[in-house]
Amino acid sequence: MCGLLESNIFSTTIDFDEWPANHGIDDEASSAYNGSFFALRYNYNAIFPDYPAGEETEIDPDDPAARRAKGFKIRYKINLLPTVDEYVIEDSGGYRTIVNEGKSFIDACCDSEEIDVFDVENLQEYLDFKWDRFARQK
């Protein structure tokens, strides 16, 4: 199971010139996105409103630290593990459909005798996202 989760089947990194490439914040962020994989680049500012892409930051040219902080490269990583779990799709009319009803990817990992599965980066990112999105009190 570890080999499968570590492969590029469930995650990919994207680096295309036509996608938003820089922003002025040096933070890591993740967000849910249910639209077309190919339309992601046009929806960056809607998906990450707190991390606007392409904004120029006014800097002091005599401050080397400020020059380095002018812009940070955006790294896109798509993690598809949530699609193996139960999730809800809402259409334009507001109708909700449950996909993979009753399926729990996390339960499958817990039932596995391969404890190293929890060391896999893709699974850790998925668990962090679920925790930040649904469990942590803000």
Image (spheres, grey):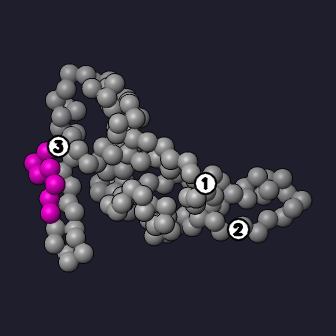
Q: Amino acid at mark 1?
A: Asp
Other-residue count near label 3 (Cα within 10 Å), few / some / many at <14 / 14–19 / ≥20: some
> Residue visible at 40% across and 35% down?
8
What number is the disc on residue 56? 2
Specify whether residue 127 is painted magenta: no
Other-residue count near label 1 (Cα within 10 Å), few / some / many at <14 / 14–19 / ≥20: few
* For marks 2 and 1 on the same chain, the one whose residue lies earlier in the sequence: 1
Q: Amino acid at mark 2?
A: Glu
Disc 1 to disc 3, C-alpha distance: 37 Å
Q: Is residue 137 above or below residue 128?
A: below
Specify whether residue 103 is painted magenta: yes
Q: Amino acid at mark 3?
A: Ser
What number is the disc on residue 17? 1
Q: Which residue reaches farthest left?
A: 102
Asked which quadrant contains residue 136, the reply is bottom left
Is residue 54 left or right of 98 when viewed as pictured? right
Magenta residues, dominant SS class: loop
Asked which quadrant contains residue 109, the reply is top left
Which percent across, then down, holds residue 84?
A: 23, 44
Q: Secondary structure at mark 3?
A: loop
Disc 2 to disc 1, C-alpha distance: 18 Å
Quarter the C terminus occupies: bottom left
Residue behind mark 3: 104
Disc number lying in front (1 or 3): 1
Q: Which residue reaches farthest right?
A: 62
Task: Please state the extent of the stretch shown in magenta in the rendering.
Answer: 97-104
Quarter the N terminus occupies: top left
| Viewer-nearest residue: 38 or 1 | 38
Q: Is residue 104 above or below residue 109?
A: below
> Residue visible at 55% across and 48% down?
15
Which percent across, then down, holds residue 87?
A: 21, 55
| Viewer-nearest residue: 58 or 94 | 94
